[in-house]
Image (cartoon, grey):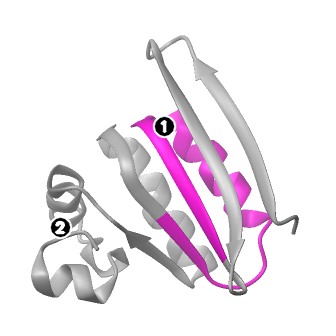
Amino acid sequence: MEDARRSSDRRSATGGVGEIVVESRAGVAVVSVAGPLTPAIASDLCRTMGQIDGPIVVDCVRVRSADPRAIGTLGRASVTRGEVILRRVRPSLRESLQVMNLAHLVAYAERETGRAR
């Protein structure tokens, strides 16, 4: 994996811009997602994660909103792939993950404190 790969997608159907950035930090892939998490962006995110070996941290601090179908796609991908942790998850996304029984994907420290670190 390159040290830093960038790919951007413009999703005209949602009227928003989503960005997926992959970086390697101390041997761990950090995938940053920005914009609305739509089904199309989630599909791109899953495809990106499928190309990475080893553990993945998904940084969600710049995710503005999340479609339930997109959350489901991310949940299925994490089950298939394993070694996926979500970090810096906003409260609204955390609540959606809890409702969908996917709260275990959020980094342990954040589940305990309820705050993004």
Q: Which residues are magenta?
A: 29-58
The quadrant in which the N terminus is found is bottom right
Q: Is residue 82 left or right of residue 105?
A: right
Q: Is residue 117 above or below residue 15?
A: below
Residue 23 location, x and y as percent? 70, 64
Residue at 58% over, 37% down: 19
Determine the CA span between mark 2 and mark 1. Answer: 19 Å
Label number found at residue 98: 2
| Residue 86, horizontal then vertical, whole percent | 41, 70
Task: Identify residue type, mark 1.
Answer: Pro
Q: Residue furthest right?
A: 2
Element carrying mark 1 = helix
Q: Residue at x 25, y 62 (%)?
A: 97
Residue drawn at (39%, 45%) of the image:
62
Instruction: In the rendered view, tell whether residue 55 sits above or below residue 74.
Output: below
Callout 2, which amino acid? Gln
Residue holding disc 1: 39
Query: In the rendered image, which quarter is residue 112 located in?
Result: bottom left
